[in-house]
Amino acid sequence: MRRKIVAGNWKMNGSKDLVQQLVGVICDHAGSLDAGAEVVIIPPAPYIPLVQQRADGKLAIGVQNVSQWQSGAYTGEVSAEMARDLGCWYVLVGHSERRQLFGESDEVVARKIGRVLESGLTAVLCVGETLDQRDAGEAEQVVAAQIQKGLASVTGEQWSKVVVAYEPVWAIGTGKTATADDAQAMHAAIRKVLEGMNAPAEEISVLYGGSVKADNAAALFSEPDIDGGLIGGASLKADEFISICRAFPAGA
Ligand code: 13P
């Protein structure tokens, strides 16, 4: 049975004060968030210990990026092993902002996936097409290639530590969300691609990301192949994020 997950990617936002307030409010509601869904906070790396202290075991914690290398003279990098050492469970890999702004290729993404899985953490592989690619009818092909290349070296038991997040680039931070039908169609296609890689496709959580808000989360999370969300802007607002965490259909 695959996991339901709501993860808040704070991106490069936040402060010590925000951690205290936001994580405090979310934790106050932790008991009444959807019992079946894992709630994950993914703050900027320096705030991880503070989030952890404030969350006091009530929330899972992730990191937004790790190095493709294990350790050594790589100034400015943070390793997967360090994230594990700090108590993180999840690592975002290949977010479209990393691909677009920092030139991360599928090959770099694949190396990072390797590092994350070696360290025993769960990798959240982010994939998604641009608007031009969607308009050209290439969306499924682009996403399939990102998955096949990014997860090329995953084997056996490692699949249990893989999550895929479908984040259409045109929906990120734009207020434009994929319709629940379009998102469902892509999620079903992603599961087919995973099946083709001999992965246990039915067991792998596939999250949707891109302008998820309190008022569209329920429609998205009702789709059979959408197992939760990767939330950007709305994860910085306590009320919105808490509502999103409660948006799974009853009994899901
Ligand atoms: P928004 O929810 O702000 O569109 O961001 C989505 C995202 O990129 C999460 O990783």
Image (cartoon, rainbow, N blue to C red):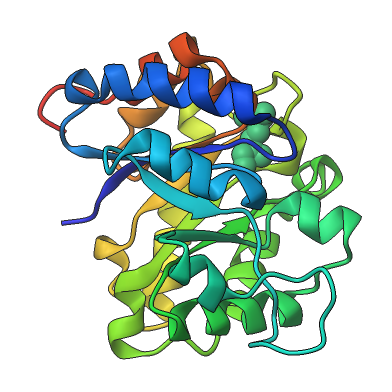
Name the residue: 41% across, 52% down.
Answer: 206
| Image quarter of residue 157 | bottom left
Residue nearest the observer in this picture, 232 or 57: 57
Q: Which residue ends up furthest to the left in the rendered image? A: 251
Q: Position of residue 12 (x, y in %)?
A: 75, 39
Q: Quadrant of ligand 1?
A: top right
Name the residue: 28% across, 73% down.
Answer: 200
Q: Is residue 211 visible in this depiction of the protein?
A: no
Name the residue: 43% across, 49% down.
Answer: 61
In this view, 98 is above or below 58: below
Q: Which image quarter is the N terminus in?
A: bottom left
Q: Is residue 161 left or right of residue 240?
A: left
Q: Position of residue 72 (x, y in %)?
A: 74, 90
Report the label total.
0
Q: Which image quarter is the C terminus in?
A: top left
Q: Position of residue 243 (x, y in %)?
A: 37, 14
Q: Is residue 85 left or right of residue 34?
A: right
Name the residue: 85% across, 75% down.
Answer: 75
Residue nearest the observer in this picture, 157 or 149: 157
Residue nearest the observer in this picture, 30 or 217: 30
Residue nearest the observer in this picture, 98 or 65: 65
In this view, 119 is above or below 194: below
Q: Position of residue 170 (x, y in %)?
A: 76, 35
| Image quarter of residue 63 | bottom right
Q: Is residue 173 visible in this depiction of the protein?
A: yes
